[in-house]
Every structure is written in structure tokens, then in C-alpha cells.
Image: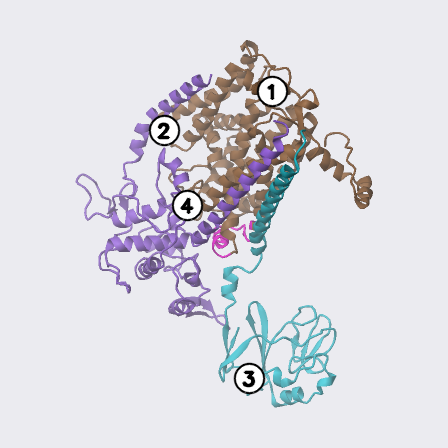
Amino acid sequence: MTNKNTILALTIATAIAAFAAPAMAQVHEVPAPPAVKWSFAGPFGKYDEGQLQRGFKIYKEVCSSCHSLSLLSIGSLADAGGPGFSEAQVAALAAEYKIKDIDDKGETIERAGRPADHFPSPFANDAAAAAANGGTAPPDMSTLAKARGYMRGFPLFVLDIFTQYQEAGPDYIHAILTGYKDAAPAGFTMPAGGNYNEYFPGHVIAMPKPLSDGQVTFDDGSPATLAQYSKDVTAFLMWAAEPKLVQRKRTGFQVMIFLIVLSGLMYFTKKKVWSAVH
Amino acid sequence: MSGNSTYQPQSKVLQWFEKRLPIGGLIHSSFVAYPTPRNLNYWWTFGGILSMMLGIQIVTGIVLAMHYTPHVDLAFKSVEAIMRDVNYGWLLRYLHANGAAMFFLAVYIHMFRGIYYGSYKEPREVLWILGVIIYLLMMATGFMGYVLVWGQMSFWAATVITNLFSAIPGVGDTIVTWLWGGYAVGNPTLNRFYSLHYLLPFVIAGVVILHVWALHVAGQNNPTGIEPKSERDTVPFTPYATVKDGFFMACFLILYCWFVFYVPNFLGHPDNYIPANPAVTPAEIVPEWYYLPFYAILRSIPDKLLGVVALFGSILILAFLPWLDTSHVKSGRYRPLFKQFFWLWVIVCIGLGWLGSKPPEGIYVIMSRLFTLYYFAFFIVILPLLGIFEKTKPLPNSISESVLGAKA
Amino acid sequence: MTTVSSAEHTRRDFLYIATGAVGAVGAAAALVPLIAQMNPDASTIAAGAPIDVDLAPIADGQIIKVFWRSKPIFISHRTKKEIDEAKNVALASLPDPEPDSERVKAGHDQWLVVIGICTHLGCIPLAHQGEFDGWFCPCHGSQYDTAGRIRKGPAPKNLPLPPYKFVSDTKIQIG
């Protein structure tokens, strides 16, 4: 009986695989983003403070001219598990920003920012952002690293549960940043205003190549290269999207240890209780 | 809930209270002395696991509601504020989001177990139908909860699912407008979904009480499908079933916590981290995994009305299962043919789930149709006929004989 | 059931107690996030940071109201008369005796900074009203003097002082 079932299941699985293979090949005309080794991957993953600080510098000097980061307070840069800025650094940084407010007389004013303020957006509203950018507003970056990804396909997506692969978003963003080509391949018709990117679905991306070698100077002596930039800013975006990742994984480890102990004890208790009837 | 209890508390105060409200006796007879078949396997622990998950969802949900704002401009932001600012907010929200998935995983195992062992058959028809009602309520609750996040998938799921009702001839559009409280999914929709999402879990809890009541009247089914005949066939619920349930609950919590702490966004769709935008539909709209088989059934049928009928029919048909299955033998263990058709049906259900996540084109459509056909044929053709033609294996005389026989 | 030796008994009891204890610890730990989530969140705490108030525009005898941590803060620019009134009270006659010097910062006698919440049941008292030239609470009739001390009515305590310091002669930082 069991044999028959197994044969049946295998036949069906083979049939599914046979049907699925060509269909999947069509979907994946864009290559899968290369896997980057992130410090925040895995059960004990942590953000690299230096990397997040560099990434923030890139965001501030490059990305922020078009992309908002509206869900984050400036003060959160000093939160535990994050870029590790000090309270004083964050207060000084906040003061650099101009925040729209209303004074005692009801007049609109611009005051110096405070750590509790959220990062101000580069455009007054979405419509203005879209109008200034060829019809599509640049997406807010607060949750971007979790809002992007790519199809992992079978069986990888099942294995991801066990390998704890949660970095499809960062890998994708990193691939986009490094995937710009100066010219589209021969035979590819590029619509006006488009840019060729190897990893963007359909290859035509509206955003012009944002980062190039030498664009941002780091204080810690890290190389001023696109390879370095794209990793650093992606890590920063991952932190922006998942600021409690370090706490989550640390708590998770404690919870796992506890549950394994509890299950073990429950198992032996169960065995003891049932020993009388078995 | 099962008959009169002989429970007599020790303390005088409790005796005084018991005489006026015999709640101690109720608990004692339902969860302590209640006889459970001694041969229950671990698939029977999922009822307890489901109660635990309902409890976790209600507790985390009440807490999340303290921080959530049901307004189109603030819903997404308030969820993100929970994730970023609220003390342990990230934990509570991930527990709730993944808890919904685990709740459905457990309910599917519970249902497959019920079908395999014929737990819907006499005298448990009402018990089974109450279960189907709970499942329907769970689907409605889960869907509305998903909408509350107000991401892209939330918004478009709300649009697509409410539009199912537009298939009703004549009054469809009127009903959909009524559901929305507007001319599209908007703030009134979000507000009423929030209200109902808070209400329905308590309705579920109420039906669960009926479900447990019905269970304790009929008694539990067991892997042999033979009713207990003597005291040798049963053991008291406490400590035997409680400790066994407890052990598997702890194991289930490991799985649940693995998702919460290590892959919390694995079961979600990245697009739901993009705030809802009524002007842009995502490239492909995919429901949460636990609705995928039904989504595949919906899409497999080229006619709008028939597709919706098939979708709802595929769930409602479960309520008729006690009368569609004509076999007098309960347990699949003694039904060699049923066993094969059952496992094929399980594979078809999982296959439909996989197809639901694929774009509706080419080979996927053909496979969806074949699988949908088998899904319904299993209920309408196979089960009624099997009862007539299947040659079942001999049943043991009693539960204890089956247990001891297996040991020998 | 077979007879159980006492050693077996002890081992079994230990197992039951250990399992129960571990389970209880887990349940207690699970309560922590459920309780902690009701405390002020990070954005509320960040918004409660100290604020600066410029005193220069406040005229002699004027009382202004500013908000810090969602609480009204009264800043009173006291006149000579008001200061004298506050100083010339017999402490023994006060329900909550406190000399005026403890109500203001040394060298800044003219500035009284108090939290504008009646110590009775939390209403906001009205300025320049009542028998003592200070504040009068419309809810239950408590009366405060020019140093924000309770003089009459059901309130038990003086108006509390917020933490503040003079950044310069005309600027204070509350918080």
C-alpha cells in the first residue's frame, strides 16, 4: 500500500516538475541577483555599525535628493542594534535638517530638526515627486528592502525556511545598483528615458545610474568604489526596513533554547504518564 | 460538558460555590475525567494546538489594536510605528501575522486528519459542520486582517475578493458597493473590516465552545474508527491527553517561533511593504498561501459566476461530507481504496495551492482545471461510489484489542 | 497500575515539578511584552525631549502656558507685588508649607515655572483668579497663590515644579 502511494506521489511530482520546468525558464529571463554575504544574515546576524554609518552617508548625500525615508525618526539612528551614532551626534545631525512647522501665530515656518522628527521628504507630496521624475514618484525607502525581492523558485524557496534566507530584498537592491550597463545589448530597443539594468525586470529602469566610483568619500578609509557603496547603502536600507532585526534574532535564540528544553521535559513527562497504560 | 459530574471539591468555600454554580464540575468532567480513547495518535493533538493559536491570536490582536489606526492615511504608518516604536511591537506584530499562517496550517492538518479517519460520520455530523463554520469564519477573519495592513497586496486583495460578489446576477454591483461603503475600496471599507476583524475571533471562540461541546457529547473518534466499548478502551483526559497535547503544543511552538524570529516575512508578499496605491495594481496579485488552493479553483473556471460558485462550493461541499461518504467504515486505515484516493486528494490540494501562486497561463491553467475536477470528483463521485464498491479490511473488535494486537 | 518504588516516585515528582516550573517561567516571560507594550513608545519618549522657552517676550505680570510632554507648564513673570505676597506668608498657615525660595530658582525670583495641573484631580487651573492672585481651579474650587501653592480647597499639594534650568537670563530649558 505504502509503495503504491509512494509511486503515485512520485509520478505526480515528476509530472509537475516536467510541466513546470519550461514555464519557469520563461519567467526567469532576468538573471537571479548574485547572493551577497551580509553581516545580518543567519541566526546570529548583526548589523555592521561602520557599514550602516557609511550607508547612511550615501543615503544622505545621494539617495535623499529623490527618495524619502519618511517612516524613520532621525533619532532612531542612535537606537540599539542600529548604526550606533551617539545621542549628541544625532542631535547635531537633526539640527541640520529644516522641518516645516507652525509658529505661535499660525505662520508656516522652517525650524531646525530635532531627533524626534522624521526625515523630511525631498518633495512636497507624491504628485510633486512624480511630476519631477518623469511621471513616477521615487519610492519611499523606509521599507524598501522588505518590499523588494525576487522569485526563488522551487526547491530553493522551501530550503530558505531552513537556511533562514531572508535577504532576497537586499540582494535584489544590491544587484540593481551594480547592474547598470552603459548601453543596451544589440537588438534591445530602449524606450526614451529608460536605462538598461541587467537585473531589473524587463531591463528598463527609470532611475538613472545613481552611484559611481568616487562619488562619496568615507571618513573611515573604506574604498570609494561602486562595489563598496552598493553594499553599504543596501545594508543601511535593510536596517531602515528592519531596525529590530538584532533584537529579534537575539530573542529568538533565547526562545528557541527555552522551547527545546520545555519540549524535552514535556516529552519525558508524557512518557512517564503514559508508561502506566502502554 | 459530558453528563453529571461526581466532582466534589475539598474546601468548604468551594463546596459552597459549587452548589450554586457547578463550574468546577463542568471543568472536571470536560477536561479531567473526560474519557478519551487510549489509541489517539499525535494527529489528535491539533485540536488543542488550534485552541492555543486562537488564544494567541486574540491576545496579540487585542494588544495590536491598542496601537493600530484604521484610516487609509494612517493604517500603514501605524503598523510601521508598531514595528519601530512600540515596545516589543515588532514581536507582537510578527507573532500575529505568522500566527495566522500557523493557525491555518494547524486547521488544515486537523481537517485532513478528520477526513482520513472519517471523523465526520455518525454521530459526529454536527461536530463536523461546526468545524466547517469555524473554518469559514477563520477565512473571513484572516482576509480582513490582511487588509488592515493597507499595503499593496492588502488593498488589491480587498478589491479582488469583494469583487467576487459582483458575480451575483442582478444585485452583484449593489452588494459590492454596499460592502465597500463607497465606489471603490476605501476608508469606509477599511473601517468596517477593522470592526469585523475584531468581532469575528470572538464569534469563532463561541463556535469553538459549541464544537467542543458537540465533541464531548459524541466523544472523540480514534484511529480505528470504532467507538470505545469499555473502560479498557479509554483513559482520562487529564493527565493523559493534556500532557500529550502539551508536548505537541511545545513542538508546534518551536515551528511557529522559528518563523516569527528567523523568517518572519517568508510567508508574506514583499509588495505588502509598499503602501496601498489605488492607482497601481501589482504585477500579480497572490493571496496568502492558505487561500491559494481556492484561488486556483476560482481561476481555473473561465466563467466569472461559475468560478465564484466553484470557489465557495469547494468549501461548502465539506459541510455535506457526512452524507457524501457512504461507507460504513470510518477509519481510512481499513479502507484500502479510500486511502489512495485520499492521498491523491491531499496532493491535489497542495498542487492547487502551488498553481494558485502561478500566473494563470499555459500549462498552469490546464493543470488547475484537472486538479479542480479531481477536487470535486473526490466528493461527488469517488466518496459516494467507494462506499458501495470498496472491499474494506476487517475491523478489530475493540480499541484495546487493536492496541494490544499491534503490540503482540 | 504496578507498585512504584519511592525512588521512582521522587524522580517522577521531580520531573513533574521541573516541567511545571519551566512552563510557568515561559508563561511569565510571555507576559513581559504584553505588559511593556502599554508603556510610552519610542516616538512618545523622543517627543518628550527637553524644550527651550524664550522668556524675553513675557511681559511683567503675564502668565503663559507652554506644553511639555503633553502637560501644560505655566510660566509666570511675577510683579514685585506678587513676589512680596508670596514671600510674606506665614508658612505654618499653608496646607503644604514651602517657602517661596524653594519654588523659584535663586536669582530669578520673578520667574515661577509650575506644572499647570491641579493636584486634586488633574484639571487645569485658571490664571489670575481666586482670593490669592494666583490660580483658581474651576473643577472643585482649589485656589493657588502667586507661588503656585495650595491655599484653599480640596487639592492636597502645591502645583508641582517641572525639571528646568536657566540656559541664560532670558531662556529656560524644561525637561
* Residue name at image x 44 percent, y 45 percent: B262
- The tint chain C carries is cyan
Q: Is residue B90 one of those drawn in magenta?
A: no
Q: Which chain carries label 2?
A: B
**Amino acid type, residue under disc 4 in the picture:** Ala
Type of colouring: by chain
Residue on which disc 3 sits: C59
Q: Range of the magenta residues? A: B64-85
Comparing marks 2 and 1, which lies closer to the viewer? Answer: 1
* Residue name at image x 67 percent, y 88 percent: C85
**Amino acid type, residue under disc 2 in the picture:** Glu
Q: Which of C166 and C71 is in front in this view?
A: C166
Residue on which disc 1 sits: B404
Q: Can residue B381 be seen in this view?
A: no
Residue on which disc 4 sits: B279
Q: For the image shown, how many numbered marks are present on the structure?
A: 4
Comparing marks 1 and 3, which lies closer to the viewer? Answer: 1
Q: How far apart are marks 2 and 4 (CA)?
A: 25 Å
